[in-house]
């Protein structure tokens, strides 16, 4: 694991960061964090949508089997 001294030594190899370089590093970090947040949010929305569609399908099939009097056990047997 890296220690703070490792980072201090590495930064002295090339000199201290300029204000512009520090801003670029901060911008890059913010962009990557935002991209990861949106990616995780997208995965969450897709999972919830799939679960909702599955539940709705079960409800609709069950409801229709009551109206049309379909014997679901016959449909599910191999």
Image: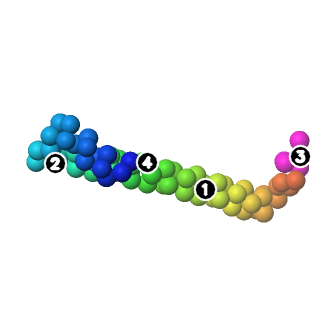
Q: Nearer the N terminus, badge 2 or badge 4? A: 4
Q: Position of residue 70 (x, y in %)?
A: 82, 55
Say which residue appears at 31% left-offset and 52% top-offset.
4
Alpha carbon of mark 4 to alpha carbon of mark 3: how far?
Answer: 57 Å
Observer-side mark, 3 or 1, equals 1
Observer-side mark, 2 or 1, equals 2
Q: Residues within 10 Å of mark 2 (few under 14, many from 20)?
A: few
Q: Nearer the N terminus, badge 4 or badge 3? A: 4
Quarter of the C terminus within the rendering: top right
Q: Position of residue 48 (x, y in %)?
A: 54, 57
Q: Secondary structure at mark 1?
A: helix
Label 1: which residue? 51
Q: Residues within 10 Å of mark 1 (few under 14, many from 20)?
A: few
Highlighted range, magenta: 74-78
Label 3: which residue? 77
Left or right: 66, with 73 as reference point: left
Alpha carbon of mark 3 to alpha carbon of mark 1: how far?
Answer: 24 Å
Residues tagged 2 and 3 counted as in contact (Cβ below 8 A): no
Label 4: which residue? 1
Residue 49 forms part of the magenta stretch: no
Q: Nearer the N terminus, badge 3 or badge 1? A: 1
Q: Nearer the N terminus, badge 2 or badge 3? A: 2
Label 2: which residue? 23
Alpha carbon of mark 4 to alpha carbon of mark 1: how far?
Answer: 41 Å
Of residues 67 and 18, the one nearer the viewer is 18
Of residues 5 and 47, the one nearer the viewer is 5
Alpha carbon of mark 2 to alpha carbon of mark 1: how far?
Answer: 42 Å
Alpha carbon of mark 2 to alpha carbon of mark 3: how far?
Answer: 64 Å
Residues tagged 4 and 1 counted as in contact (Cβ below 8 A): no
């Amino acid at each position: 694991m890296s220690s703070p001294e490792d980072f201090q030594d590495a930064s002295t190899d090339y000199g201290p960061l300029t204000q512009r370089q520090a801003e670029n590093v901060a911008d890059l970090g913010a962009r990557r964090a935002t991209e990861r947040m949106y990616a995780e949010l997208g995965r969450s929305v897709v999972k919830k949508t799939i679960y909702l569609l599955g539940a709705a399908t079960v409800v609709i099939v069950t409801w229709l089997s009551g109206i049309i009097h379909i014997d679901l056990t016959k449909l599910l047997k191999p």
